[in-house]
Amino acid sequence: MKKIFLALIAVLMVAGVAVADDKIVEIPFNKVPDLAQRTVKAYFPENTVVKAEKNKSKDMKNRTRVYLDNDATIDFDKDGHWMIVDCRGSHVPMKMVNGKIQMYLGKNYPGREVVYMGREIKNGDITFILDDGTELHFTNENTIIE
């Protein structure tokens, strides 16, 4: 009986993973929202798009993820605004960072590179991770959160 129960759990887990994977669909880059396409082309002109995926699950609200040839990934909301820029294999282009935050980083963390930035859905606050592991948080008005 115990073996049957464990087998049933294993089957349900596999079925659950299969259902979850159905919500992530590979799409051609030209089907990515226009704003997202322009963002990739403007900030990563030297890189090639490896693939793009749309996550159709309810909790991800139709986010799109773009994979680049430098191992960077960029997540966009349904309208094409970036939500996460993960460049841990390289760095986030500084021109993608707000000018006020650029000045703060240059003054307080000279020579450091941003390898990750993520925007909160609810309030627009932004988290940055630098190449030395330092984590910084800014409000959506670009003020450091201490």
Image: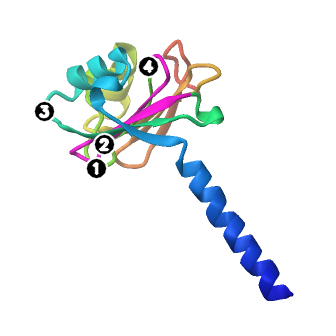
Query: Which image quadrant for residue 23?
Result: top right
Q: Residue at x 81, y 79 (%)?
A: 5
Cα distance in 3D space between marks 3 and 4: 21 Å
The local crowd at label 3, few if under 14, some if 14 to 19, many if 20 or more residues have their Cα within 10 Å, is few
Q: Which residue is mark 1?
A: 89
SS at mark 4 in the image: loop
Amino acid bearing label 3: Glu
Q: Position of residue 63 (x, y in %)?
A: 50, 30
Q: Nearer the viewer, residue 44 or 77?
A: 77
The local crowd at label 2, few if under 14, some if 14 to 19, many if 20 or more residues have their Cα within 10 Å, is many
Amino acid bearing label 4: His
For the C terminus, give its image quadrant: top right
Q: Position of residue 97 (x, y in %)?
A: 35, 22
SS at mark 3 in the image: loop
Q: Residue furthest left?
A: 46
In the visual, does 3 lie left or right of 65?
A: right
Q: Which residue is mark 3?
A: 46
Amino acid bearing label 1: Gly
Q: Which residue is mark 4?
A: 81
